[in-house]
Amino acid sequence: MNWFSLLGLEGLVARWRAHVIEGAIAAEDRMDLARSEWTDLKQRLQQLLVLTIVVAGLTVVALIMLSLAVLVHFWDSPQRGLVAWLVAGVWMAGWAGTLVALVSVGQRAGNGFALTRRELAHDWRDIKERL
């Protein structure tokens, strides 16, 4: 004997069952999205770490070359000074390029889980509207 059918609750139970299934599917989709964004965030953080190490190394080299250029600039011939400044300039350009890349990756890393947050906010709005 089906008590839900006798009490006229069969439609209500079916609707709740459909809502629970829909909620489970939505939760699974959100978990997949969060997992995907976590992978992206990990990759950006790894890039950030590598670029930080490169910037630190290039900073040391750039300062050494800049010091060498200043010393050589006041040495005997003007050609030595020009070459030293050119070498120091190349190292400084490499440092600046790496610094720009580091800042760029750092800014992108700050937007972690943006899609997941947007989807959850949208879901929350939908839930509030239904209530």
Image (cartoon, rainbow, N blue to C red):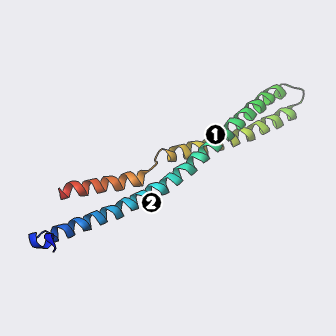
The mark that comes first in sequence, 1 or 2, is: 2
> Which of the two residues, 61 or 53, is positioned nearer the viewer here?
53
Residue depicted at 37% across the width and 51% down the height = 117
Q: Are marks 1 and 2 in contact (CB under 8 Å)?
A: no
Q: Quadrant of the N terminus?
A: bottom left
Tell me, for residue 75, which label it has, or none. none
Residue ID at (53%, 53%): 40
Please say if 121 is above or below 12: above
Would residue 92 be found to the left or right of residue 104 on screen?
Answer: right
Say which amino acid is labelled 1: Thr
SS label for mark 1: helix
Q: CA distance from mark 1 to mark 2?
A: 30 Å
Q: Amino acid at mark 2?
A: Asp
Q: Residue 32, labelled with which disc? A: 2
Comparing 11 with 130, the one in front is 11
Report the side of 2 relative to 65 (left or right).
Answer: left
Graded by Cα atoms within 10 Å as few (under 14), some (14 to 19) or many (20 or more), the crowding at tag 1 reads some
How packed mark 2 is, by other alpha carbons closer than 10 Å (few <14, some 14-19, many 20 or more), is few
Q: Is label 2 in a helix, a strand or a loop?
A: helix
User: In the rendered image, which quarter contains the C terminus?
Assistant: bottom left
Find the residue positioned furthest to the right: 76
Residue at 19% x, 67% y is 13
- Residue 75 falls left or right of residue 116: right
Give whichever of 105, 130 is nearer the camera: 130
Image spot of residue 77 (x, y percent): 89, 30
Of badges 1 and 2, nearer the viewer stands 2
Q: Position of residue 93 (x, y in %)?
A: 69, 41
- Residue 127 lies, with reference to residue 95, above or below; the image says below
Residue 106 percent across, percent down from the top left: 54, 43
- Most extreme residue toward the front is 1
The residue at which mark 1 appears reads as: 52
